[in-house]
Amino acid sequence: MTRIGIFSSPLLAAILAISACSDDPAATTDPASPTSRSDAPTSAAPTTGADASSTTTSTTAAEVPDDPYVGFGVWVDVFDYVPAFAGNPPPVTPADVAEMAADGARTLYLQTGRDDPRSPGRFADRTRLEAFVRAAHRHEMQVVGWYLPTHIAPARDRARVEAMADLEVDGRPLDSIALDIEWIDGEANVALRNQRLVELTEATAELIAPRPVGGIVFPPVVLDVLNTELWPDFPWRALEPHVDVWLPMAYWTYREPSSEYRDPRRYTLENIERTRGHLADPNVPVHVIGGVNDRATTAEIQTFADAVAESDVVGWSLYDWATTTPDARRALATAAAR
C-alpha cells in the first residue's frame, strides 16, 4: 500500500484544527471545533519567499524506530502559537517543548500556516515555526508539519506544501508532512474537491519523498454512519498510493452523551477498523487522534489510553497540547507499555 514501504515492519503494523459532526445526521461540522475557533479560511494569496531545498536519506521503520508517527504525539496549531491568531503572548511557546519531551511525547504535530488573511505568507509565522522545530529536534522529538487545504485555489494549497517541503532548520527538514483533510466548504462539487485533494496529496508525496506523508481524516464512523452526506464518496482508495500513515480524528468528545459512540473505547477501535476496511488492508499504519481534551473526563482519557494499548496502532495522541493536562499526558505516554 505505502509509497516507500516505511511501515513494512510487522511490529509497527501490529492520528487542528479539526472538524467533526454531531450524532444528528443533519449536522455537518461542529462550530466549536478547533478549525472553527475563528474565521474560516479565505482566498488570501500567499506571498512568495525563498526557502532552502531539503535533502534527506531514506529510512524505514524497521531500520529506524523513531519514525515520526510512532508513539505518543502532541498537537499545536496556529491558534496556540501565532499572535495573529492567538493574541500576544500566545499560550504555547517553544519553551513548552521541553515539557512535551519530558512528558514522553515523541512527535510534535505543528500547523505551519493557514489559508487566511492572518497568514498571508506561506507560513503563519516563520520565526516562531523555526523556533518550535529547533526546540523539538534539540529534545530529540520528530516534527510533522501539517496544513489544512481548502481546495479553493489549488495553486495556493500547493505553494504552502512546497514551502513546507523545502523548509530546513539548521540543515534539517521537517520529518514529515501531513494534510488535514476535512475542509468541505471551499469546493462544493465533491468530484472536483476529490480530484484536487488527490492531486495535492500525490504532489506532496513527490515533493517530500522519501519522507512519509500523513493523511489526517474524518473519522469513518462519521462518514459511514452518522452523516453520510458530510463527504460522500470520500476517495480512500485514490489517496492510498500517496499516504503512508492514516490519522483518523476519532474525537469521542463530539458525540452526544446518550450516543453509544461517546464510549472512547468503542469509538476509537471502530474508527481504526473502518479506516483499514476502506483501504482493504488490516495492517495499514494508523495513528489515532482522540479528544478534544478539555471536553473529556479523566475516566474517558484513561479509557482511550486503554483502547490504544488494546489496538495495534503505530501511534496515538489527543488534540491538543494546550488543553491536555499533565495527568492525561502521563496516561497517554505509557499507553502502549501496559
Image (cartoon, grey):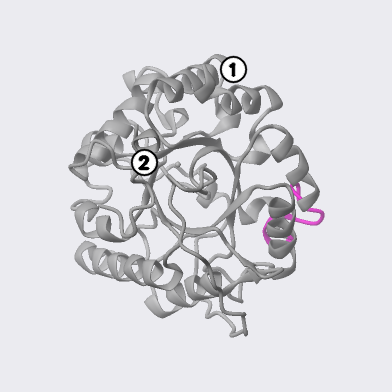
**How far across and down, in percent of the image, does residue 323 sit?**
65, 35
Q: Amino acid at mark 2?
A: Ser
On whether residue 86 falls in the magenta region, the answer is yes
Q: Main secondary structure of the magenta part?
A: loop
Q: Amino acid at mark 1?
A: Thr
Q: Which residue is mark 1?
A: 298
Picture residue at 37% right of the left edge, 71% below the top = 206
Q: Is residue 87 above or below residue 323?
A: below
Picture residue at 48% right of the left edge, 70% below the top = 161
Q: From where the camera sits, is residue 234 visible?
A: no
Task: Measure the C-alpha gap from mark 2 to mark 1.
Answer: 33 Å
Q: Is residue 189 above or below residue 223?
A: below
Q: Which residue is mark 2?
A: 9
Q: What secondary structure is found at the residue carrying circle 1?
A: helix
Q: Which mark is residue 80?
A: none
Picture residue at 35% right of the left edge, 69% below the top = 200
**How far across and down, in percent of the image, does residue 89 sit?**
82, 54
Q: What is the number of callouts on the image?
A: 2
Please give left or right for residue 193 compared with residue 280 in the image: right
Looking at the rendered image, the disc whose residue lies closer to the viewer, 2 or 1, is 2
Instruction: Identify the magenta region.
Output: 83-93
Quarter of the rendering containing residue 51? bottom right
Q: Is residue 227 above or below residue 159?
A: above
